[in-house]
Amino acid sequence: MTNAQIAYAFLVGLISALGALIGNWFSSRASLTSSTNALRGIGRQIQLQRATKIAEFRQAWINELREAMANFQSFGVTPDSGQLETREFYKYGTQIELLMNKADPNYSKLQNAMYCFLSAKTIEQKFGCNAPFVEVCQDILKTEWRVLKKELAEATEQSTGDS
């Protein structure tokens, strides 16, 4: 083999090696980009799952609060309740207070409406407390429902990468 042939073979081998290296570099770069995109997708999916789970807890809390409010109201308008009914009435009142956030802008309005029932002596007074109580309960529940929908919408938007 002549020096020219050896040089030619070396050059072909060198070009082939460089081609393989460049091909591997592009391949690994594409693989890295693909992996990065996959990780971002997984991160968004985890965020959506987290938001969905929080929304489930919030919905359960709203349902529990609604149930306690309805029970409290039904005992509140009951005429001449006995000891057992009075106990249940106070239980639901306490449950509402414990489920509510004291920083909620409607908290004091809710407490006033609840204590209106507690101080009512006649059936007319009890029925007079009913409408304000139901109104504030509806406001609270509607506000919380809006918060729940907003949080889910934001999480869904983030998970699709539209943000």
Image (cartoon, grey):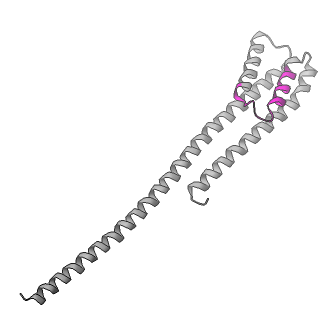
Left/right placement of residue 81 relative to residue 29 reads right
Q: Quadrant of residue 16?
A: bottom left
- Residue at position x 75%, y 38% from top? 141
Predominant SS along the magenta part: helix
Left/right placement of residue 160 relative to residue 24 reads right
User: Vertically, is 18 above or below 113?
Assistant: below
Image label count? 0
Of all residues, the one furthest to the top in this rendering is 83
Residue 106 at x, y percent in the picture: 81, 34
- Residue at position x 71%, y 31% from top? 65
Of all residues, the one furthest to the front in this rendering is 3
User: Vertically, is 46 above or below 75?
Assistant: below
- Residue at position x 65%, y 47% from top? 151
Q: Look at the image and say whether residue 122 sits in the magenta stretch.
A: no
User: Vertically, is 106 above or below 155?
Assistant: above
Over which residues does the magenta segment extend? 98-117
Give whichever of 145, 98 is nearer the camera: 98
Q: Look at the image and say whether residue 115 sits in the magenta stretch.
A: yes
Residue 57 at x, y percent in the picture: 61, 37
The N terminus lies in which quarter of the figure?
A: bottom left
Give whichever of 8, 147 is nearer the camera: 8
Q: Quadrant of residue 118?
A: top right
Residue 110 at x, y percent in the picture: 82, 29
The C terminus lies in which quarter of the figure?
A: bottom right
User: Vertically, is 160 above or below 52?
Assistant: below
Residue 125 at x, y percent in the picture: 92, 21
Give whichever of 150, 89 is nearer the camera: 150
